[in-house]
Image (cartoon, helix red, strand yellow):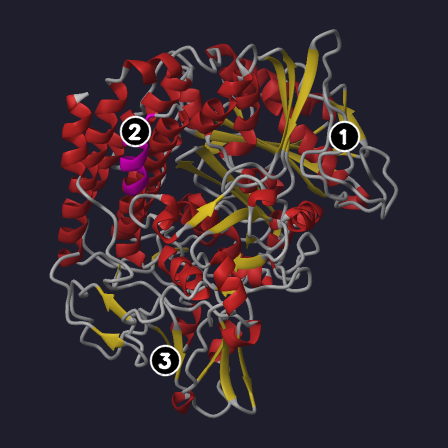
Amino acid sequence: MFDVFRERRRQGKRTIGYPAEAPTLPDRYRGLPVLDDSRCPDGCKSCVESCPTDAIGRDSRGLALDMGRCLFCTDCLEACPEGAIRFTHDYRMATRNRSDLVVRSGVELALAEPLDARMRKLFGRSLKLRQVSAGGDNAEESDLNVLGTIVFDIGRFGIQFVASPRHADGLVITGPVAENMKSALLDAYESVPSPKLVIVVGASAISGGPFRGHPEVSDGTDRLLPIDLYIPGFPPHPMTILDGLLRLLGRLEGMPERIRAEEPPAPPPASGPDPLAPIVASTATVEGPPTSS
Amino acid sequence: MSANAPLPMGPHDRPIRLAEIPVLAVDAFRSAILGQVNAGGRIAALFGMAGESNRVRLYAVLMYLETAEIAVLAADVADEYPSLTPDCPQAHMFEREIAEQWGVIPRGHPWLKPIRFHPSYRAGHDAWSRAAGEAIVPGVTDFFRVEGPEVHEVAVGPIHAGVIEPGHFRFQCHGEKVFHLEISLGFQHRGIERAMVGGPDKRTLPLVESIAGDTSVGHATAYAQAVEALSGCRVPLRAQALRGVALELERLANHAGDLGALANDVGYLPTASFCGRLRGDFLNATALICGSRFGRCLIRPGGVLWDVEPDRAEQLLARLQAALDDVAGATKILWDSLSVQARFEDTGVVPAEVAQDLGLVGPAARACGVDRDVRRDFPTGIYRFALIPPSTWNTGDVFGRAYVRWLEIRRSGQFVLQQIKSLPGGPVRSKPPGPLLPEAMAVSFVEGWRGSICHVAVTDAAGKFARYKVVDPSFRNWIGLAMALRDQQISDFPLCNKSFNLSYCGHDL
């Protein structure tokens, strides 16, 4: 017994200081993409053609990147020698509307607005969620599970994953909605008492992700259910999920909006700009280098 | 060629021209496989692909532990052939898969049921005589039934109680005692193998990385090795070392997480809490290398996308040493707790012969004393130069599966520290691979954290994938969980399930 106490003391307190403190993310983390289409040479479609999920397009308003399809890979960065696309360290990406996930040059992302007053009164301090994996690949599921660990301790915000849809206030859906899971997903949705929320996590659940167009999947949830919150990523970082949930509940109002990146351990190579090196979003206040990781 | 002629064996990491693969009569194919399996060979993969004049060509990839060689043989079949499974149980899932994908009936298969519930790839040929366009409902099929007074059936899933993937489980119970568990999956089927045909293209790597998201590095490495073999691409030594580091970090994260989850399932919360955090520390170490906690985008044919510079190596070493020390402390109290051991020991025993016969892999097999690990037996990349001795135990119970994970954590931890301290010099990526060798096959092995992953790439005349076969370790091991549940208390199912921690999507593809 004393060994257990000793070990507990040795392991120490591990819950992050978020939301009072900014979370720390690795320097190579690929968060919110920013576009600068003033760098695009005329007629260049390198990034558009390189994208595995056709998340990038160009129309009369210029270059656009759909985070609902984006796999946050590096194919467009490698395809674009001009640096017109960069991934920042900003983990805040959740939106209320599907169209808000489309990122454009010089347009600020419309982050998720809180629920209305009635829904906040119901769910703001206690939100029970039922997770349904509908063809999810266990990466999204793992980073949802991790919110329950002592590091994120999602319970301190009154959010809990429950076993039965009948005990839940909403569904958290992952995966492209495999045809073989469609009816079970719709049954689960019906079983959640109203009013209810639907939160979709990851590119697969939002748009089908890499499975888009497969006859075995439904290309995500959009044509099946009304969605209250979109959390993009492949998979989203746990901080992106937590930020989205807290934003939806209005729990981040009045909190300082800060992000912080780990100091890169080595300077970028001298030969020209490194297309894989992320930059920090211009929309956020950046803290100085962290004193510890 | 007769059934008794020696099979053409070759090194496991070289491409094989399809023209050199012997095409046997079905009986000779069957007896050649049985002869080799009885002589100690193992089936790495057994699969069909579209053949000439609407026939199906079956390929069997056999592996020989003693010489680290493989042999590939083929046979053409129309609508049925005599099943291997009655004489060779490790073929059972492969033959069910062939029946479902190609509408070819392995005649005499003892339990021929769909495994993923999708229409046949060969129009007009269906192993269960289902009409074209008939709805195929997952989980609706025959199940073993035990009859009698006081016998009852418990059905669970597809949606389970936790944040976990879907699958359907049926228990035949007498009181609390489970006579038999039958597992019916397929709810996660996303059509990955079918979509790989015609590749490689820009969608191929993301598909491979999401075969099983918790094994992104393992599957991406298996894919990269297959493409490199077919294109004659050489991977720089530094990249090989970094791939090994990433693969072992994936193992460390999942094994640490599993020990925490096992502790949680017996109500031992200190280890559950500590290991839940430590799993994330290993994931974050992977993110320090490539920005993604799951190692996404790190592995590319030709090498890896990011280097580990000296400063980053220092940071990694410090973090990993601390995490490994904390895992040691978190698990010491687990092994020292009598109440935990009382629940772990003799629960969910899989006898060694059963593990051997069914072809189980990974920690589930090694916990039964079945000493197999492709890092040693069929080494690729850095494992040709740096051996991680396989860890085994001999009890085959929950304790065995837990303890093997702890032994592997220690050895993988030492390996990762050693590799990072002594990374070879040079680049981390060679030129992108050129065109693939046409009409050829490459077999690729990786010891993922759940067990051996096998990918088989077959190219057409244009050097594009005509077939891409993925064998995830879970495909082999789900039957092991069913065996472990025999004569157990149904209340021990969560614990037994967690001790295997298998992938639904890796199985369903």
Q: Please name the amino acid that badge 3 sits on.
A: Pro
Q: Which mark is residue B408?
A: 2
Q: Give how far across and how far down residue B499 sits, in percent.
A: 43, 25
Above or below for B213 versus A202 = above
Q: Same chain for the residues at labels 3 and 1, yes or no?
A: no
Q: Please name the amino acid that badge 2 sits on.
A: Glu
Q: Give how far across and how far down residue A126 sits, in percent.
A: 45, 52
Q: Secondary structure at mark 3?
A: loop
Q: Give how far across and how far down residue A156 sits, in percent.
A: 34, 50
Above or below for B370 versus A24 = above
* Quadrant where the N terminus of chain B is found in the figure: top right
Question: Residue, x 62% and y 11% (percent of image)?
Answer: B175
* Quadrant where the C terminus of chain B is found in the figure: top right
Q: Secondary structure at mark 1?
A: loop
Q: Which mark is residue A81?
A: 3
Magenta-tinted stretch: B268-277
The subunit letter for the residue under badge 2 reads B
Residue B431 versus residue A207: which sits nearer the camera? A207
Which marked residue is nearer to the observer: mark 2 or mark 1?
1
Q: Residue furthest left?
A: A291
Q: Same chain for the residues at labels 2 and 1, yes or no?
A: yes
Q: To which residue does mark 1 refer? A: B141
- Mark 2 burial class by Cα count in 10 Å: few <14, some 14-19, many 20+: many
Q: Residue furthest right?
A: B131
Instruction: Answer with left or right where residue A280 lies relative to residue B178.
Output: left
The subunit letter for the residue under badge 1 reads B
- Mark 3 burial class by Cα count in 10 Å: few <14, some 14-19, many 20+: some
Q: Which mark is residue A49?
A: none
